[in-house]
Image (spheres, grey):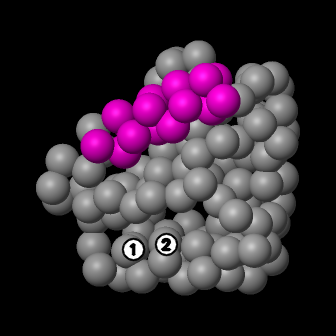
Amino acid sequence: MKHRLSFGYFKILTDNILEVVADEGVEMTLEMIEECHRFVEAHFKDDFGMLVNRVNNYTYSFEAKLSIASYEYLKAIAFVYYSSDSQKITEELYQLRALDGWNFRSFSGLELGWQQAFDWLQQELISVKVN
């Protein structure tokens, strides 16, 4: 099911995987991240994974970088990138948040990365249930 937010959309792919797609040219702000948090808290009450589909080019404010993906039940996050700039933004975000210990992987969308990201999230969520 697809849900429109002020900056893009969230698509619930399975009962425990959420896809995020931001609109072209958006700068994700702290307010937008708070909108994300409200959505996630309303729809996910147990372990889940997030697939961030960077099909569009967008950036994050510094404050947004510090709060993005800070969810109690988030067990894995996959970024799918389609350009070297998008890959760089993803890697910088991961490095900034390294102390948070994200279970994180990035995938090239130009090399069937969306499906690989989805499959990886499914496996990560299965392993969380086993442990």
Q: Determine which residue is flagged by label 2.
A: 90
- SS state under label 1: helix
Q: Which residues are magenta?
A: 116-131
Q: Residue at x 64, y 23 (%)?
A: 129
- SS state under label 2: helix
As drawn, 85 above or below 120? below
**2 and 1 marks in contact (CB < 8 Å):** yes
Circle 2: residue type: Thr
Circle 1: residue type: Ser
Q: Tell which tag, 2 or 1, sits nearer the viewer.
A: 2
Q: Residues within 10 Å of mark 2 (few under 14, many from 20)?
A: many
Q: Determine which residue is flagged by label 1.
A: 86
Q: Can you give x and y, in whole percent of width and height, for residue 92 in the image?
A: 55, 82
Q: Can you give x and y, in whole percent of width and height, for residue 103 in the image?
A: 59, 54
Q: Can you give x and y, in whole percent of width and height, for residue 56 in the image?
A: 38, 61
Q: Main secondary structure of the magenta part?
A: helix
Q: Is residue 55 visible?
A: yes
Residue 24, quarter of picture: bottom left
Q: Residue at x 74, y 82 (%)?
A: 62
Q: Is residue 65 magenta?
A: no
